[in-house]
């Protein structure tokens, strides 16, 4: 199988600073890690490669420091990494991010087909599967994965907890629900977002660490992708942060005492006073 894993480098701490001019996260000087949910996507992709053969390509969109996340994924067993980075992409919301990553996936497919390392499926992607973590720990929107599938016009299954069966052009999955799970079959290529119940990420071997250290990371900028400038970065982000502030501390509440009828009357009177 030929698999692409989309990952994100996120701050390791919740103590992050906000740029007062752009209202975006300031990541410089903050220690970063691979988004924890993306680790499960990397692990699942490697397990599928071990079962069926093929290649695992890891893609991230971010500043130059995000290269370390790609090397960590390669140390686990991924084959190659692509860094999608350009100042034109800065400030992207989930819509612009998914649009940019979808464009990067199309470009990677073109590169692989040109190198005869990935057969074109005839559906315009040449990729069997795209994996993402269910959400990023710094945004918690869970929108980028589904957004990528929408831009690529391929099926999506979210909150996948188990891959039950893989056949030619088809996959059967267990999708986690609030209570239990459901069985879903999807055609391939498809995009899956996975939850932590799907596996336990491995620890990189010494051989993997050495390979990752010397691995080539391919950079993809706006020049290579040639995306619509009106759909990338802040300009292409319909969701924008207008103002960021710390809410004022809430005033202390009241403790109502007495029997239930008395408490009920007190509560009704308080609500009436608040309304009036």
Image (cartoon, grey):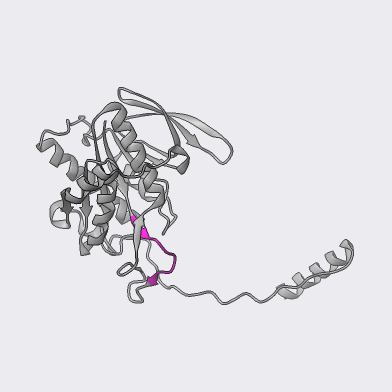
The residue that appears at 24% across and 55% down in the rendered structure is 67
The answer to whether residue 213 is above or below residue 91 is: above
Please tell me which residue lies in front, 195 or 124: 195
Please tell me which residue lies in front, 54 or 178: 54
x and y percentages locating residue 249 in the rendered image: 59, 76
Instruction: Farthest residue to the front: give it.
Output: 206
Q: Is residue 102 left or right of residue 257?
A: left
x and y percentages locating residue 38 in the rendered image: 37, 47
**Number of marks in picture:** 0
x and y percentages locating residue 245 in the rendered image: 47, 75
The answer to whether residue 185 is above or below residue 87 is: above
The answer to whether residue 232 is above or below residue 2 is: below
The residue segment tinted magenta is: 9-17
Please tell me which residue lies in front, 79 or 191: 79
Q: In this orientation, does residue 262 appear? A: yes
Look at the image and say whether residue 114 sits in the magenta stretch: no
x and y percentages locating residue 253 in the rendered image: 71, 73
Look at the image and say whether residue 13 sits in the magenta stretch: yes
Q: In this orientation, does residue 74 appear? A: no
Quadrant occupied by the N terminus: top left
Quadrant occupied by the C terminus: bottom right
Task: State the image quarter where residue 128 is shown.
Answer: top left
Q: Is residue 34 left or right of residue 58?
A: right
The residue that appears at 25% across and 29% down in the rendered structure is 53
């Amino acid at each position: 199988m030929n698999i692409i894993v989309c990952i994100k480098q996120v701050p390791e701490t919740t103590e992050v600073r906000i740029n007062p001019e752009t209202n975006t996260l300031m990541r410089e000087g903050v220690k970063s890690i691979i988004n924890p949910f993306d680790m499960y996507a990397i692990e699942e992709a490697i397990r599928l490669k071990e079962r069926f053969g093929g290649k695992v390509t890891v893609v991230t969109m971010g500043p130059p420091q995000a290269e370390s996340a790609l090397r960590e994924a390669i140390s686990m067993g991924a084959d190659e990494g692509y860094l999608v980075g350009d100042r034109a992409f800065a400030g992207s919301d989930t819509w612009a991010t998914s649009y940019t990553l979808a464009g990067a996936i199309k470009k990677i497919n073109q590169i692989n087909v040109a190198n005869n390392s990935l057969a074109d499926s005839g559906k315009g992607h040449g990729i069997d599967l795209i994996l993402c973590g269910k959400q990023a720990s710094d945004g918690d929107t869970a929108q980028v994965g589904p957004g990528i599938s929408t831009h690529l016009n391929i099926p999506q299954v979210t909150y996948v907890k188990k891959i039950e069966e893989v056949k030619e052009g088809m996959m059967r999955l267990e999708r986690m629900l609030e209570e239990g799970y459901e069985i879903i079959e999807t055609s391939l290529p498809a995009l899956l977002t996975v939850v932590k119940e799907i596996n336990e990420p491995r620890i990189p071997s010494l051989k993997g660490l050495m390979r990752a250290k010397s691995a080539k990371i391919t950079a993809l900028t706006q020049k290579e992708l040639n995306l619509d400038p009106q759909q990338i970065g802040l300009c292409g982000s319909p969701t924008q942060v207008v103002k960021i502030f710390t809410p004022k501390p809430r005033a202390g509440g009241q403790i109502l005492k007495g029997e239930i009828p008395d408490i009920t009357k007190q509560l009704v009177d308080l609500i009436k006073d608040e309304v009036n």
